[in-house]
Amino acid sequence: MSEKKHFVTLVGSLRKGSFNAAVAHTLPELAPEGVTISHLGSVGDFPHYNADVQAEGFPAPVLSMAEEIAKADGVIIVTPEYNYSVPGVLKNALDWLSRVSPAPFAGKPVLIQSASPGNIGGARAQYHLRQILVFFDARVMNKPEAMIGQVTDKVKDGVLTDEATRTFLSKQLQAFTDFSA
Ligand SMILES: Cc1cc2nc3c(=O)[nH]c(=O)nc-3n(C[C@H](O)[C@H](O)[C@H](O)COP(=O)(O)O)c2cc1C
């Protein structure tokens, strides 16, 4: 039976040639039948979090992203690891989103993916991200985990081409579709 679901991706890199963005942009073609995936705006469109700015009104990119997240059946965060943790730009975006009411991530199914040229594939950032999402009351899927190591050999021209990784991510997306039911 096909399931009609819509997921959104949030990418933790601003880099034009980002491997993580390449993974995110490949996900729609790996999704189960009936599942659509679109991409949220860039976390680089958010200003640095400042409570004084918030007091004057949330920036428009924050509010529109919060609305898209609230409407989605699930959020897929695809991020690099920076110095064993979450890139500052992603943390900044999450800090902004955490102040929006009603909380867009509350009860929201979340899938985490990471990619790195290194062997560990961003695993350490994933566990910091999970900790951050505790306060959000997000429903983060535990397994299977996708930590894509040696990603430089797996992406060509902005597309994830490695067959084994594509097959694995297809299975993970099916699991996330079931999880988000
Ligand atoms: C400031 C900085 C810190 C980094 N720290 C890590 C790290 O802790 N672990 C890791 O696997 N790669 C680390 N890297 C390498 C990134 O994984 C690599 O640059 C990757 O391509 C970034 O993701 P992107 O291609 O999606 O932009 C770091 C890169 C930068 C610029």
Image (cartoon, helix red, strand yellow):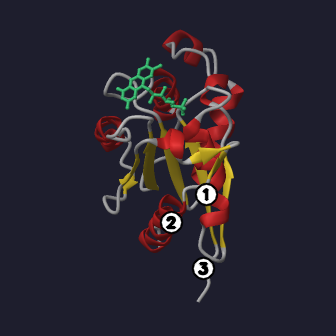
Ligand 1 position by quadrant: top left
Q: Provide residue 53's location: percent of width, then percent of height.
A: 58, 13
Front: mark 1 or 3: 1
As drawn, the label of residue 3 is 3
> Amino acid type of disc 3?
Glu
Residue that badge 2 annotates: 173
Q: Provide residue 168's location: percent of width, then percent of height.
A: 45, 65
Q: Quadrant of residue 127?
A: top left
Front-most of 173 and 40?
Answer: 173
Q: CA distance from mark 1 to mark 3?
A: 16 Å
> Amino acid type of disc 1?
Leu
Residue at the front extreme, as displayed:
153
Label 3 element class: loop
> Amino acid type of disc 2?
Leu
Residue that badge 1 annotates: 27
Q: Provide residue 148's location: percent of width, then percent of height.
A: 43, 47
Q: Residue at x 69, y 30 (%)?
A: 61
Count of numbered circles on the image: 3
Q: Quadrant of the N terminus?
A: bottom right
Is residue 87 toward the left or the right of residue 141 in the image? right
Q: Residue at x 56, y 30 (%)?
A: 13
Whether tag 1 and tag 3 are in contact, CB under 8 A, the answer is no
